[in-house]
Image (cartoon, helix red, strand yellow):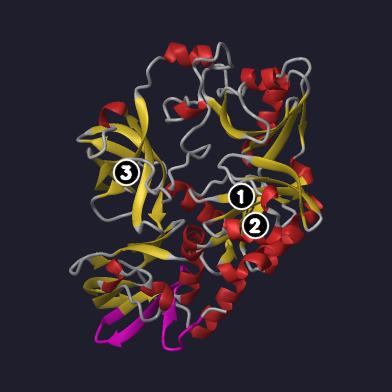
Amino acid sequence: MSKVLKELKYLDSHEWVRDEGEGVFTIGISDFAQESLGDIVFVNLPEVGDEVEIGGSFADVESVKAVSDVYSPVSGTVCAINEALLDSPELINEDAYEAWFIKVENGTLQEGLMDSEQYEEYCKNEE
Amino acid sequence: MELKTPLYEEHVALKGTIVPFAGYLLPVQYPTGIIKEHMAVREHAGLFDVSHMGEITFRGETALQSLNHILTNDYTDMKIGKVRYGVMLNDNGGVIDDLIVYKFAEDYYFVVVNASNRHKDFEHMKKNVLPGTEITDISDSLAQVALQGPASFEIMERLLKKEDIPYKYYTAKEHVSINGMDAIISFTGYTGEKGFEIYVASENGPALWNLLLETGKDLGLIPCGLGARDTLRLEAAMPLYGHEMDDTISPLETGLDYGVRMSKEEFIGRDALIRKGEPTIARVGLEMIDRGIMREHQDIYSGENMIGHTTSGTHCPYLKKAVAMALIDKKYAEPGTELVVDIRGKKAKVRVVPLPFYKRK
């Protein structure tokens, strides 16, 4: 059973987003996502100042076996990236909710995201 | 409909992630994960279900002549109890499959082929064997496991008398009794480590699997899936059918010269290889200079010129770096040459390096 955090919103492509207030959002991938990917060995992140769009791919994660795109639930400007992931992508496997990918400012959040209960249900059906 | 190997229930019980592969349902990994499974084989031992592999026997007084006619290698001087690699070509010199041949008697050989090619191989063999050779596809009657890694010998020594263990690379013993189960055991494998491949009757598969896991547990033996099998063989630069070779690639182009005896008077595909002459492409190793991970089917450039493509690529858990094998224009095959790979639209610098990437000490 993968972990789901109450205070986050989730996408059906298994990203999470935290509303930090004042138009800032933090984005990462869920515990379910890291579990399905397996050992993550590489992450590609955008640069600070890049624009991201709702539904657009802003990063990719690679496990030993496969590459997956990471999609944004927010439109806005990247104001921080988690550089630790570039050297230690395994941090995502260790704790997917600590290992955030990017922070976005002046952001607009996608509507209709799942809350933790809905997401938990959604993951059950995907298993 | 995918088939289940005799060990399917064991994989489910071990919570393996089951995927379809070459017509079979097999575990790509267990909850331990590919990296730990890979490292177990390099440092201790790993156990793989390779029951999907095909086994075809050649029997009869012309068995040797049939093998020499159908395969590129020369089996003439082979002694009983030896194992030898070979390649099977079509008339155009393309690879139908690569395989290994075990010799158990002057008139009895046991041939192990790739799962995905098994039916195609059998048809080709049937059409081309000489009168006096009887071939039989016995794949469905056998379970095959691979016990790989430095601790493999100690594990086998706990189960068998020394005289029943093949201690030399590419040798095999037939009719070895493991806890009463009749087995073929060979010192072979597809990981770049020392180890064994063991064949027993299908119904004995689960008992053998569990006996080995139990016996090797305190030595670090764990079950490993297809994911680790692929990263291990790639790290050791072992070619895989459908990647480094197929029916359009000659064995000389992909660097399998060691399994091709042009000195032999005749074999299927030999004339085509002679007609083609010296290969203009070569199989090389690549490693990243820039960041990123190469995968199969990515184009390789020298400046603006596309000079080839990757055939397999991954992040190697033991070497901790991203590598790929590629078939490229021979002019650029010298180790140290800097090239560019197109990784999903992004150009990244790579360097040609000698193969294999990993060699056991």
Dot 3 lies on which element?
Answer: strand
Closer to the N terminus: mark 2 or mark 1? 2
Q: Nearer the viewer, mark 2 or mark 1?
A: 2
Vertical comparison of B16 with A113: above or below: above
The image shows residue B238 at horizontal and vertical percentages of: 47, 42
Dot 2 lies on which element?
Answer: helix
Tag 2: residue type? Met
Question: What residue is shown with label 2?
Answer: B156
**Label 3 lies in what chain?**
B
The residue nearer to you, when weighing A2 against B325, is: B325
Vertical comparison of B112 with B78: above or below: below
Dot 1 lies on which element?
Answer: strand
The image shows residue A85 at horizontal and vertical percentages of: 30, 70
Point 53% across, 78% down: residue: A2
Closer to the N terminus: mark 3 or mark 2? 2
Closer to the N terminus: mark 3 or mark 1? 1
Labelled disc at residue B196: 1
Q: Nearer the viewer, mark 3 or mark 1?
A: 1
Labelled disc at residue B286: 3
Magenta extent: A3-25
Point 65% across, 22% down: residue: B67
